[in-house]
Amino acid sequence: MKVAVVVQRYGEEIGAGAEQLALGLAEHLLALADVTVLTTCALDYRTWANHYPAGETVLNGVTVRRFPVDRARDWARFQRLSSTAATFSSAPLQQQLAWMAEQGPFSTELFAELERAYPLYDVFIFVTYVYAHTYYGLPLVSDKAILVPNAHEEPYLYLPLVRPLFHLPRAIMYNTKTEMRLVNRVTRNGYRTHDAVAGVGITAPTSGSAGRFREKYGIQGDFLLYVGRIDEAKNVPALLDAYRRYQADRPESPPLVLIGTPHFPIPGHPKIIPLGFVSEQDKFDAMRAASVFLMPSLYESLSIVVLEAWLMECPVLVNGHCEVLKQQCRDSQGGLYYGSYDEFAAALDLLLQREDLRKALGRQGRAFTEKRYSWDAILDQYRRAFDYISSHRA
């Protein structure tokens, strides 16, 4: 089999969930197929400015072909345009199309390559529904396409513009049953032949070292941890506000460590410790050392960093307004969730006071992740999808 993975940006230094899913999927699919990644030259998701050189490289055994983005995105202008997305369901199609073109990344050369390469690949896997590479690219190869939508409760999913997209591919691979139910309800694409809940495999070092992290960064005692994109889209400002309020009420509370590249100024606070981008080993060491892992996001199709934290037996506290995160905690019995500041504070109090509870939640989270998100089980789902596409070629 020759498989193309099509994603908006690609690289080990990109910490976002969809891109990490694409990276892990491409590398593990090498066990089943000859894999090529078709992507853009962008690194920064806000601007889509060309960063990587165009052309072909090899990363961890995967051939990567990059194509330039036509033009960089004006982030401030796009934010103003997106502020009206909630009303787009009744907007003229032309206005919705203008939004998608501005959403990007728009690469004429990538779309031309998809047309040219149609006969060269047996399967095209498009990662994430909401960007232009999928909206304009998937219809070009739809009878060979698998969509990994990474969909969650957000205004864009309700756009009449995108609803037909979920009826085109030969197969859709969801991350969770919650995501599948949401997409089926909103896009009315139920009763499809070969859609499945596949998810993504989670790999981690054989062990994380709490002592190594503490020695390297000089952080002793209990601490809270957030890992991921430090921006408004992940609701991080709300987390920082809640933490500062919590710390003001409880001056002896542990510090909050942030790992990831910030996209807004982090407020100065003696107990908020931003470490920036760190290595994978340092990330897992931090998860092993942390007392509680915090995930404030409102919109997730699957939180990979929560699963990674569980592999390090770290309990989590997540935003209960995100149905996927809440369901992950319910299914795993690996963490707690909150719906208000009072619940946030009460849950943190309980977790920080009860080491036995933290250890129990961490162990249960690890057992859940190892059982549900192993690469062997996920590759079996993709193998079945490949067989289906091969036997039902249009």
Image: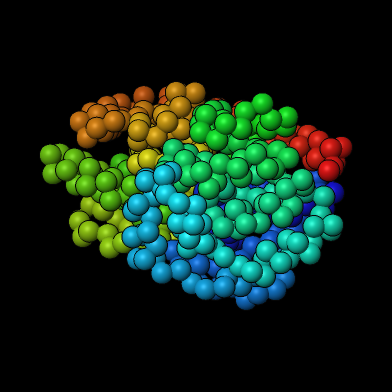
Looking at the image, can residue 153 be seen? yes
Q: From the viewer's side, name the closer residue of 54 and 167.
A: 167
Question: What residue is drawn where x is 62% and y is 76%?
Answer: 53
Q: On the rendered structure, is 239 left or right of 281?
A: left
State whether residue 243 is above or below residue 184: below
Q: On the rendered structure, is 378 left or right of 345?
A: right
Q: From the viewer's side, name the closer residue of 268 and 71.
A: 71
State whether residue 268 is above or below residue 144: below
Q: How is the image coloured?
A: rainbow
Furthest residue toward right = 391
Q: Quadrant of the C terminus?
A: top right
Looking at the image, can residue 366 be seen? no
Question: What residue is drawn where x is 66% and y is 26%?
Answer: 191
Residue 154 image point, x, y percent: 42, 42
Furthest residue toward front = 92
Q: From the viewer's side, name the closer residue of 217 and 98.
A: 98
Q: From the viewer's side, name the closer residue of 220 and 189.
A: 189
Instruction: Count how many numbered circles sit on residues in the image.
Output: 0
Residue 247 image point, x, y percent: 18, 43
Residue 273 image point, x, y percent: 29, 56
Question: What residue is drawn where x is 70% and y is 73%?
Answer: 55
State whether residue 210 is above or below residue 71: above
Quarter where residue 377 is shown: top right
Q: On the rendered structure, is 11 left or right of 357?
A: right
Quarter where residue 388 is shown: top right
Residue 253 image point, x, y percent: 21, 41
Question: What residue is drawn where x is 68% and y is 43%?
Answer: 168
